[in-house]
Image (cartoon, rainbow, N blue to C red):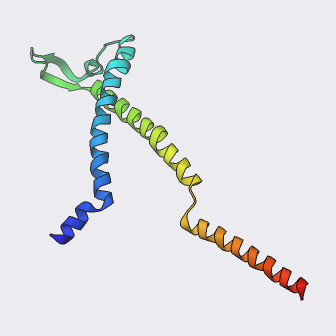
Amino acid sequence: MKGFKEFLLRGNVIDLAIAVVIGAAFTNIVNAFVQGIINPLVGAFGAKNLNAYTSCIKGPCVVNANGQVTSGIQLMWGSVLSAVLQFVITAAVVYFFIVVPAARFMARRKSAEEVSAEAEAKEVALLTEIRDALVRQA
């Protein structure tokens, strides 16, 4: 149990749990954006709901009252297009609002090695000045 407790209290697990919850909430935002803005824009040129875009590839497609195909083979490419749009929008938002700012922040942030190297360089310069001052006095 001790190892399991340490595993759960590790920062990575908690960060991952938070990311999953935020991701689920973000998915709802993206879905609403696609259904509320993208679908109506596409609807200006055709059907308002992307799921309505289908093609029949074998025989005449007969659809019953429940919307199920009873004969023929129907490709529902509109729902695939909607899912692709949601993915692209999600990926773009994650990239431009999370990845790019994080990369900029990490580039500005100095690593511990860089900080110690700068401190060592300053120390060497100071010791060199002290040495030179002592040589001039002698």
Report how many numbered discs are placed on residues in the image: 0
Examine the image and state in which quarter residue 32 appears.
top left
Give the camera-side residue of 110 and 71: 110
Examine the image and state in which quarter residue 120 appears.
bottom right
Q: In this rendering, is residue 118 above or below 48?
A: below
- Which quadrant of the figure contains the C terminus? bottom right
Examine the image and state in which quarter residue 6 appears.
bottom left
Q: In this rendering, is residue 21 above or below 33?
A: below
For image coordinates 81% across by 83% down, the residue present is 131
Name the residue furthest bottom.
Answer: 138
Give the camera-side residue of 29 and 87: 29
- Which quadrant of the figure contains the N terminus? bottom left
Say left or right for 115 vs 23. Answer: right
Say left or right for 20 vs 126. Answer: left
Give the camera-side residue of 103 and 116: 116
Q: Position of residue 29 (x, y in %)?
A: 32, 29
For image coordinates 28% across by 45% down, the residue present is 20
For image coordinates 51% across by 44% down, the residue present is 101
Name the residue furthest front.
Answer: 137
Q: Position of residue 39 (x, y in %)?
A: 34, 19
Q: Position of residue 110 (x, y in %)?
A: 58, 59
Give the camera-side residue of 70 and 36: 36
